[in-house]
Image: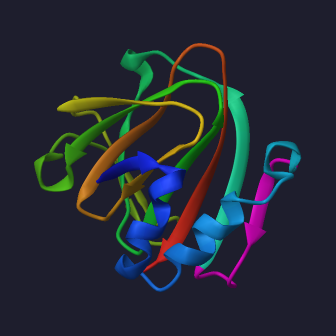
């Protein structure tokens, strides 16, 4: 997992050939007013999903893991807390892995909670279990799906 500010994003471009394109997308002046939905930036290999939704309680958070994609979560507005636990330590399966949706859900408790503020991003690799969208109020964000 990586947690940092967008102002430092260029430090991570060498980790994946599409990270630079994702971070460039976040610099668009109209990002905050872009309609929620799915936007293909580099075909299915780099997709941005813009959402605006109510946060949930810690007790409602479920850890999720992916195998085919890296997630980059960027907070546009609101305050979001996200849980983290090493995927290798996620043992209490709630929903088995779906190759079609590239996701599995777990009921294990996160071992770490991080708080995101507007302008920050978190990168979750397949070895990172993560529980997004914890908070009160509206959480406006972009989640990138970056193909491995």
Seen in the image, is 70 located left or right of residue 86? Answer: right
Residue 100 can be seen in this image: no
Residue 60 locus on image (x, y percent): 43, 21
Residue 75 can be seen in this image: yes
Seen in the image, is 12 located left or right of residue 35? Answer: left
Where is the N terminus found, in terms of image quarters? Answer: bottom left
Q: Residue at x 52, y 64 (%)?
A: 101
Give the dominant element type of the magenta stretch: helix, strand or loop: loop
Q: Residue at x 36, y 56 (%)?
A: 124
Q: Residue at x 40, y 48 (%)?
A: 4
Seen in the image, is 30 located left or right of residue 68? Answer: right
Where is the C terminus found, in terms of image quarters? Answer: bottom left
Where is 4 relative to 97, above or below? above
Magenta range is 35-45
Q: Quadrant of residue 68?
A: bottom left
Seen in the image, is 145 located left or right of residue 139? Answer: left
């Amino acid at each position: 997992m990586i947690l940092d500010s967008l102002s430092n994003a260029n430090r991570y471009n060498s980790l994946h050939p599409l990270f630079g394109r994702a971070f460039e997308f976040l610099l668009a002046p109209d990002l905050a007013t872009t309609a929620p939905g799915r936007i293909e930036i580099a075909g299915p290999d780099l997709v941005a999903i813009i959402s605006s939704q109510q946060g949930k309680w810690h007790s409602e958070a479920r850890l999720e893991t992916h195998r085919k994609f890296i997630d980059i979560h960027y907070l546009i507005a609101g305050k979001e807390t996200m849980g983290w636990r090493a995927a290798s330590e996620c043992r209490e399966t709630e929903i088995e892995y779906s190759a079609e949706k590239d996701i599995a859900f777990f009921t294990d408790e996160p071992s770490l909670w991080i708080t995101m503020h507007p302008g920050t991003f978190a990168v979750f690799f397949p070895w990172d279990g993560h529980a997004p969208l914890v908070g009160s109020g509206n959480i406006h964000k972009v989640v990138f799906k970056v193909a491995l």
